[in-house]
Structures are given as C-alpha cells and as structure tokens.
Amino acid sequence: MQEKALNSPGFEIDPDLVITLTHGDPIMFEPFWKEEGHNATVTISGWEKMSYYACDPDDICWFLEPDFANEVLRLHRIVNNAATNGCHIIPGAGSTQLIHATLHALASIEARRHPVNVVSAAPYYSMYSDINSLKSALYHWAGDAATFKGDDNFIEIVCSPNNPDGMIRHAVLSNNAGRRVHDMAYYWPHYTPMRGPADHDIMLFTMSKATGHAGTRIGWALVKDTDVAREMVNYITLNTNGVSRDSQVRAARILKVISDGYEFPNSNGAGQFFHIGRHLLADRWRRLRQAMEVLGKFSLPRFSTEFCEFFKEHAQTYPGFAWLRSEDESINDCGDFFKSINVQIRNGRLFGAGPNYVRISLMGSDAYFDGFIKRITSVG
Ligand code: PMP
C-alpha cells in the first residue's frame, strides 16, 4: 500500500514514512520478469517431483535436478564467469545454506584442530559474522582476515565482488595451508565487468543475486574436490534432507530464459536480462550519485571502468549496495543521520567497519528507491 502511494506521480512523500533499505532484496528486477519473462512460467503437476531423489540415489549429489545442473552450466558457459570443468554442482537453499555446508565440510575433513577460525577481510558481508549463533563445535567466526594473527587453522571467505562495497577481492591470507571459499554471488555482468572465468576450489552463486529470485531459495556451489563435495552433501542431507526439487525446476526455467535471450535473441520473446539489469542499476547509481552530491555529507566508492568480456566493451561497476562514508565531521554515527530522516540502513559496524560507514541497498522496489532519492534531495 505504502509503496504504491510512493510511486504515484506527483506524490509528496510523507516524512514520517519509514523507507527500508536494509536488505538486499532484489525486487528491482521484477519489472523485467513481468514484462519479458512469460516463458519463465512453470507448471508442476500434482504427481511430479514426489520422490526425495532427483537423480540416481547413488550419485554424489542425489538431490540435484539434472535440468537445473544443465542450465547452471549453460549460463556459466554463456557468461564465461566461472571455470566449471570437473566441478561438482551442489544446490542449496540459497547460498546461505551452502556457506554453512562449506564451512562444515572443510572443518570436518581438513582441519586438525577445532574450532577452525573463519575470517573475511573487512568490510565483510555481515552474515559471515553471524555464524557463531549456530554454535558449531567445528568452526567459529574470528573476524577480519586482514588482522588475523593465528596459524594455518583458518578458512577465509573471499566475497568478490564484495558485499558491502562492490570491490573485486582476492584472498588476503597467503598461508597456503588455510582453506578458501569464494562467495561469487555478485560476479554477474549487470553488477560488474566480467574479467574472465573465476577458477577457485569452491565457488558459491545464488539465484537471489544472479536473476533476482531470492524467494526461490536456490543457490549453487561449484566444488572441485570430491571429498569436500560429498561432505557438503552430507551436511545438506542432515540439515534439510535434500533441496526443493520444485524450486530447482523453477530456477532451471529462469536460467533458461536468460540463456535463451542470448543464444536465440529475437526468437523467444525474452529480452536480454544482463543488459536490462545493468541499465536499471546504472540509472539508480546515476541518481544516487546526483542526490549524494546535493546532500554533500557522504562519499560513494569510485570504480574504474574495465573491459567487460561479456559486453565486449569498457563497462562501469554498479553494485547492488552503496557503501557510504561520512565526510561530515558533525556526523559521528551515520546510522543516527539516516534514522533522523526515517531511512533504515545497515550500520558500518555490522560489516567490521566504523559507524562512519553505512550500507544501503539499491536492489529494492522502485517505490522505496524513488522515495529515498526524494527524501535525500529534500534534506540536501
Ligand atoms: N552471499 C552474499 C555476498 C550475499 O550478499 C547474500 C545475500 N545477501 C548471500 C550470500 C545469501 O544469499 P541467498 O541465501 O539468498 O542465496
């Protein structure tokens, strides 16, 4: 209701209306799927997908839908963003489940001591630091990788492009005995120039950020080592006894629509998702930069233009989040400033940075984004 009102032409934004920009909920891609995604509709009959097993029960990943695996491989081939040769594909209930499955697997099989230290360079995705809530005896959060002083008993999570700041990241700990997990949720052409296929032992992707289908709760891991893959599957078996087959079918169809848009342009009626997604994000970044300039209190990251192997041209970076730094000495805690104008954001502290930083999501609905820009402009 509120969002509808915010969207109406000439609507004067009620200053008491709270605008929520805390979550990376990717609603901004909804118009694409409404207008272009008719072929993404899926029907599953009552008798279909009843079994627990999606393939041969003796396969390493017995809950992997073959169509989903094929479409994952196809899209990676088209975008050329990940080396998939010889990798096991493991679906998960979002990459959230896969992060836990990966930590569990690496800590179970490879560590000599428990708990293993899990680190990631600050500013890091706030969810990593929440892993202690699950009280695993195998691993625990040990903070910023850049200041980690321990020995080789660590797992470093490398998020690239990084949530919250959109930067391309590499592992910061050089000790080869430690283990690395690459969270590649945002390594897609609408967010960042494609620099060729990423090639790491464990890479995590998710529908939530690739296509905007967070509610489908499907992510996938590309895993080179068979023992690690087996142990991840074991974790998911214990945790949820497989991954929704219905969701994998839907995810496969959505990935197919994107791939068809590139492999058979003009023939299936679907537009080119990454082109349109990049256009939407570019527009939001343009308006955000303008509004922040008017406000004059915060700076935004600057990204250099790079050649994108996918678009075959020099391209800009348009992250799904904006990482704002306070440039106004009168603002000690950016969170307070945004609270005072009724905008909910995530404080920099949650990401291992100071309160002079905040993260705002740019992936929400047009209504919230438009409302945010209006409000910022009106107080500037
Ligand atoms: N990794 C990163 C870097 C993310 O930003 C997110 C979502 N915010 C996830 C993983 C988890 O995504 P999901 O569980 O929806 O797949």
Image (cartoon, grey):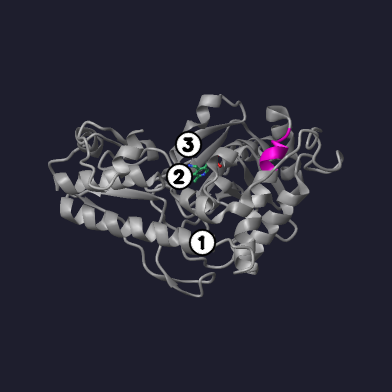
| Residue 273 in sight from this viewpoint | yes
Asked whether the beta carbons under mark 1 and mark 2 sit within 8 Å of each other, the answer is no
Specify few, some or many for label 1: CA neighbours under 10 Å numbering under 14, 14-19, or 20 or more: many
- Quadrant in the rendering for residue 233: top right
181 vs 282, left or right, is: right
* Amino acid at circle 2: Ile
Residue labelled with disc 1? 274
Looking at the image, tell me whether mark 3 or mark 1 is earlier in sequence order: 3
Q: At x 53% / y 60%, what residue is drawn? A: 273
Q: Mark on residue 127? A: 3
Whole-angstrom CA distance, mark 3 to mark 2, is 20 Å
* Amino acid at circle 3: Met
Specify few, some or many for label 3: CA neighbours under 10 Å numbering under 14, 14-19, or 20 or more: few
Residue labelled with disc 2? 27
The reply to whether the magenta stretch includes residue 39 is no
Q: Is mark 3 within 8 Å of ligand 1?
A: yes
342 vs 281, left or right, is: left
Whole-angstrom CA distance, mark 1 to mark 2, is 15 Å
Whole-angstrom CA distance, mark 3 to mark 1, is 26 Å
In the rendered image, residue 45, in percent from the top left (x then y), is placed at 76, 37
Looking at the rendered structure, the secondary structure element under dot 2 is helix
Specify few, some or many for label 2: CA neighbours under 10 Å numbering under 14, 14-19, or 20 or more: some
* Amino acid at circle 1: Phe
Residue found at the far left of this picture:
330
Q: Mark on residue 40? A: none
Which span of residues is magenta-colored? Answer: 242-248
| Residue 359 in sight from this viewpoint | no
